[in-house]
Image (cartoon, rainbow, N blue to C red):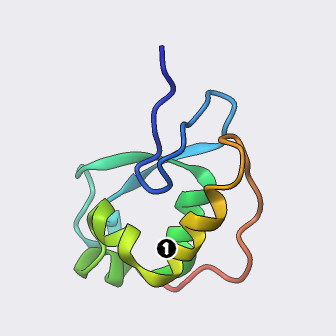
Amino acid sequence: MDDPICPLCQRPIPPEAKQSQHHLIPKLRGGKGGETVLLHQICHNEIHATLTETELARSYHTIAALRSHPRLEKFIAWVGKRPPAFHSKTPGARRKR
C-alpha cells in the first residue's frame, strides 16, 4: 500500500516518519470533532509556530490557505528537498493561542 501524502508539503508520510493529525479549525476555536488532516509532525509544528489559533480559525482553515501563507510557502520549498521521514525541531517559540 502507498504511504499517505502530506497535504501541506506533498511528500509521502512513511510509517517511520513522525506524524500527527491537524484540526483545520482549532479545537479551541470550535473545531473539536471537526475535520482533521494527517501531516508530517514537522509540517504540523511549522503551522503552529507560524499562525495563532485565531488566525487558523479565521483565515487559514484550508490546506490551500495554509499553502499560500508566505512563511509556509518558504518552509514547503525548504522541507520539500528533505527525505520523507525527515524531522527536526522547529526554531523559535510557538505562537500564542
Please state the horizontal and vertical placement of residue 91, each as a whole percent of the image.
Answer: 74, 77
Please state the horizontal and vertical placement of residue 65, each as a whole percent of the image.
Answer: 30, 71
Q: Residue at x 62, y 27 (%)?
A: 15
Numbered circles on residues, count:
1
> Which quadrant, please, contains the C terminus?
bottom left
Q: Nearer the viewer, residue 1 or 77?
A: 77
Q: Is residue 43 visible?
A: yes
Please state the horizontal and vertical placement of residue 31, each as a whole percent of the image.
Answer: 25, 61
Callout 1 crowding tier (Cα within 10 Å): few <14, some 14–19, many ≥20: some
Instruction: Locate residue 45: give its quadrant.
Output: bottom right
Please state the horizontal and vertical placement of residue 84, each as a whole percent of the image.
Answer: 65, 41
In the image, residue 54 above or below residue 23:
below
Instruction: Locate residue 92: give its quadrant.
Output: bottom right
Q: Residue at x 27, y 63 (%)?
A: 62
Q: Nearer the viewer, residue 37 or 79?
A: 79
Q: Residue at x 55, y 84 (%)?
A: 95
Q: Is residue 79 left or right of residue 43?
A: right
Q: Residue furthest top?
A: 1
Q: Which residue is mark 1?
A: 73
Q: Residue at x 27, y 68 (%)?
A: 61
Q: Nearer the viewer, residue 44 or 94?
A: 44
What kind of element bears circle 1? helix
Q: Is residue 97 visible?
A: no
Q: Amino acid at mark 1?
A: Glu
In the image, residue 52 above or below residue 81:
below
In the image, residue 83 above or below residue 66:
above
